[in-house]
Image: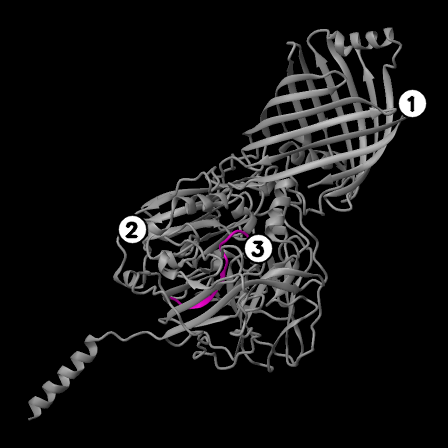
């Protein structure tokens, strides 16, 4: 009897163990739509998730199965990427990658995957610039076992940079003028101020070095003028986290900004860093940390006084603050520090005059362009650089904390525990980061995403990614679907995991990767306009999926065509005491009558669903877009007591490489049209700063003639805008024209622009009254005041003169050889 009982119990236990224990399913409903918001004082349309910016905080427990239904109520495609998640490729949320097609207007798509990690993460759109427009939110994943870092309170501190402009508009403006948002450029006043401090020789040499390279030492950030938010609140709205004296508080910092790096501190309080990018690290005590776009850091703080403390996140271009408060009572505010001085980049940021870890001088030097020669230093091994803040002597590094403060350095991060894979790499792959500010074009290994071949990895291989920043700007490089082990000089078993890495200007960093997640994964700069302008590539990991991955890949039986009632998201794993302002999910949101809601989840079941057209669209959205930029100047004045009216129009439409260029210029004097020209050119990029051009020019006045036109246009060293063209008329006459101009900033808005234009002929052309040689030239200076970049009144003074045989012909006709023309007008850009 006893044996039978034991056998029965054993059988029951065996049967029980043979059935898998199903993970808890945590479900969310997210509704994405455009609606009006008033954040800056102006009511504009932005993107909301469940009616709020940012979207709701999503909470999971490690081991859960996540089911997230996303409904697109916009009139454009959208998507959600789960930043830093380990998940199947077709759930990663990047249109054109891994079988995912995006979420069409009116559709509901169901994301379904297993939660395989814990920590602080976030989610955001991966469609055009929607992330900048409000499409983002935070994620907290609680560990399945006890968290090694306990806290009495737990807050998300999500930073973002807000603008009333739409993201498409910002990128278009940057393509029109890469300095469109820069109002901290060096001026003539700054030059004379530097000369008093450093002397003429040093000031002049510094000016020459930057001008020769056609770079600006003020280019810390491409887009300025943001309003900085904490959890969707402005500094005036003062997001507040409450505490009781002596409590331990966990702050989950997320940089959800589009373009802004921050230096983060809490004056009067030390921070203990316990996690980076959601992964636990050995505790580090710091006063401040440099915070790259898309990174996350978890810190512990303990307020020991019953007073308000200010959380200060200062952008590196020093154009404001993101501010929040920790306080014992609502309504309290801490002290707000003064804005730190904006740093300037130095030659060290160009990869010049620096020694590498071996002590040998680096041979790299900046050449013409925003791209630099190969950089041999690897700060990951060096130990001399702070790794995330830049090389010693760099402006990037000087933009950090004052002396005497402890700043988090990548080199000090150590994984909490032991890495499962600490093999040395099988091979090294260089990831060269390049760019061109003149065209606002950004590349990986010399190619924009629209032109790039993917990086192919074998399943399970160990590779070393060597990130070489050949630009003067910092980049935050993010790999989807897998964690990189930051090669920071620590022992291999404690190298920290990172999904996003700051690559400082002019420097080199390395990271190790175990290619254990099959599929197509994006690798890109997380500065959103760098990514959209081309700084993205595809990493393909070949090989069989693991059984776990196979079970959670989308398939027709998993991704059913659902007709369901909305379900409230589950909040079963709230931390013991949280005080987050988490937006509620409004299930009563109306469905606009013009949008039909339909679940299309099953369409994403395999790669075959991604058409050639969708792949082409993904490439076009990341470096292959068509833009335009036009400028019109029109002014009226006088010359020798005669009224004059003149116009100058030029502009282009096309891609970075191929443009249709249109020009027209002319002048009327005394009611008579003296000159009228119309150009149509094909313009092809042949050098980072130069276009080759070919086309036709048609003159209506003084004589109707058509010319074949060949030449080039671009930016010469020392910032001289230059155009040089050869013309062959329909009669076979050969002529040439050279035009140059240069801007000198008196202030950020008052600009002096001297210019010259010269016309030469290879033979006499009697019908035009010109002779061989230099026929005419004009020298002028324009003073404009930019009320905005697109609208500027100006005053123009110009001296015109005829030379050589052309001068003699004019005298024989009793015409003047020279003239002064004064005019006032408007310059418009569009």
- Quadrant in the picture for residue 402: bottom right
Q: Are marks 1 and 2 in contact (CB under 8 Å)?
A: no
Q: Earlier in the sequence, mark 3 or mark 1?
A: 3
**Foreground label between 1 and 2:** 1
Cα separation, mark 3 vs mark 1, equals 54 Å
The spot of residue 640 in percent (x, y) is 91, 23
Neighbor class of circle 3 (other Cα within 10 Å; few <14, some 14-19, many 20+) is many
Q: Quick check: 615 above or below 401?
A: above
The mark found on residue 258 in the picture is 3
Q: Which of marks 1 and 2 is nearer the N terminus?
A: 2
Cα separation, mark 1 vs mark 2, equals 79 Å
The mark found on residue 459 in the picture is 2
- Which region shows up in magenta? 117-129
The mark found on residue 719 in the picture is none
Neighbor class of circle 2 (other Cα within 10 Å; few <14, some 14-19, many 20+) is some
In the image, 493: left or right of 225? left
Q: Name the residue under label 1.
A: 640
Q: Quick check: 811 above or below 348?
A: above
**Foreground label between 2 and 3:** 3
């Amino acid at each position: 009897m006893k044996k039978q009982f034991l056998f029965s119990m054993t059988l029951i236990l065996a049967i029980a163990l043979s059935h898998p224990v199903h993970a808890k399913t945590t479900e969310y409903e997210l509704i994405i739509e455009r609606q009006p918001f008033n954040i800056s004082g102006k009511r504009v349309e932005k993107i909301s998730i469940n009616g709020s910016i940012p979207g709701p905080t999503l909470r999971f427990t490690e081991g859960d199965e996540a089911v997230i239904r996303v409904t697109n109520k916009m009139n454009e495609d959208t998507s959600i990427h789960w930043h830093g998640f380990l998940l199947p490729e077709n759930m990663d949320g990047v249109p054109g990658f891994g079988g995912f097609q995006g979420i069409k207007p009116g559709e509901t798509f169901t994301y379904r995957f297993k939660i395989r990690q814990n920590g602080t993460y976030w989610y955001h759109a991966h469609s055009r610039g929607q992330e900048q427009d409000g499409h983002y939110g935070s994620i907290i994943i609680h560990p399945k076992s006890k968290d090694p870092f306990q806290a009495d309170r737990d807050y998300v501190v999500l930073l973002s940079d807000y603008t009333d402009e739409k993201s498409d508009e910002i990128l278009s403006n940057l393509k029109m003028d890469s300095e469109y948002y820069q109002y901290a450029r060096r001026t003539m006043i700054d030059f004379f101020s530097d000369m008093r401090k450093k002397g003429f020789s040093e000031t002049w040499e510094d000016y020459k070095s930057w001008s020769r390279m056609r770079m600006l030492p003020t280019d810390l950030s491409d887009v300025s003028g943001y309003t900085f938010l904490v959890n969707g609140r402005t500094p005036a709205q003062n997001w507040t986290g409450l505490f009781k004296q002596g409590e331990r508080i966990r702050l989950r910092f997320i940089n959800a900004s589009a373009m802004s790096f921050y230096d983060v501190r809490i004056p009067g309080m030390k921070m203990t860093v316990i996690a980076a990018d959601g992964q636990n690290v050995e505790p580090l005590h710091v006063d401040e940390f440099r915070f790259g776009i898309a990174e996350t850091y978890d810190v512990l703080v303990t307020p020991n006084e019953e007073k308000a403390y200010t959380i200060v996140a200062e952008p590196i271009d020093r154009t404001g603050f993101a501010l929040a408060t920790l306080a014992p009572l609502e309504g309290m505010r801490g002290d707000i520090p003064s804005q730190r001085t904006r740093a300037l980049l130095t030659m060290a940021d160009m990869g010049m005059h620096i020694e590498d870890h071996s002590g040998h001088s680096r041979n790299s030097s900046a050449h013409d362009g925003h791209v630099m020669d190969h950089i041999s230093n690897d700060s990951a091994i060096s130990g001399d650089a702070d790794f995330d803040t830049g090389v010693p002597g760099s402006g990037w590094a000087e933009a950090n904390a004052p002396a005497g403060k402890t700043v988090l350095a990548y080199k000090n991060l150590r994984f909490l525990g032991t890495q499962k894979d600490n093999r040395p790499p099988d091979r090294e792959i260089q990831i060269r980061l390049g760019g061109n500010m003149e065209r606002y074009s950004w590349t990986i290994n010399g190619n924009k995403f629209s032109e790039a071949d993917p990086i192919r990895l074998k399943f399970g291989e160990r590779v070393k990614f060597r990130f070489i920043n050949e630009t003067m700007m910092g980049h935050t490089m993010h790999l989807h679907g897998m964690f990189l082990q930051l090669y920071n000089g620590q022992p291999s078993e404690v190298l920290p995991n990172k999904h996003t890495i700051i690559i400082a200007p002019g420097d080199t960093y390395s990271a190790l990767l175990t290619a254990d997640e099959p599929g197509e994964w994006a690798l890109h700069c997380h500065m959103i306009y760098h990514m959209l302008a081309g700084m993205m590539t595809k990493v393909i990991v070949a090989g069989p999926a693991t059984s776990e991955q196979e079970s959670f890949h989308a398939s027709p039986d998993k991704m059913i065509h659902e007709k369901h009632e909305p379900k409230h998201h589950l909040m079963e794993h709230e931390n013991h005491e949280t005080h987050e302002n988490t937006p509620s999910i409004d299930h009563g949101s109306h469905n606009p009558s013009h949008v039909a809601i339909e679940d299309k989840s099953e369409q994403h079941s395999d790669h075959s669903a991604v058409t050639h057209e969708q792949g082409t669209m993904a490439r076009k959205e990341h470096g292959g877009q068509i833009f335009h930029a036009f400028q019109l100047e029109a002014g009226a004045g006088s010359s020798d007591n005669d009224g004059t009216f003149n116009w100058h129009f030029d502009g282009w439409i096309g891609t970075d490489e191929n443009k249709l260029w249109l020009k027209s210029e002319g002048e009327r004097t005394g009611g008579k049209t003296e000159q009228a020209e119309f150009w149509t050119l094909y313009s092809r990029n042949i050098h980072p700063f130069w276009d080759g051009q070919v086309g036709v020019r048609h003159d209506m006045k003084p004589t109707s003639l058509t010319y074949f036109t060949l030449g080039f246009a671009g930016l010469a060293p020392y910032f001289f805008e230059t155009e040089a063209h050869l013309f062959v008329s329909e009669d076979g006459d050969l002529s040439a024209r050279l035009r140059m101009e240069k801007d000198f900033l008196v202030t950020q808005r008052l600009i002096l622009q001297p210019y010259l234009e010269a016309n030469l002929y290879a033979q006499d052309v009697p019908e035009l009254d010109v002779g061989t040689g230099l026929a005419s030239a004009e020298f002028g200076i324009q003073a404009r005041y930019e009320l905005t970049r697109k609208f500027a009144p100006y005053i123009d003074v110009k001296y015109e003169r005829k030379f050589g045989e052309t001068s003699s012909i004019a005298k024989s006709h009793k015409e003047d050889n020279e003239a002064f023309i004064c005019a006032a007008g408007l310059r418009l850009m569009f």
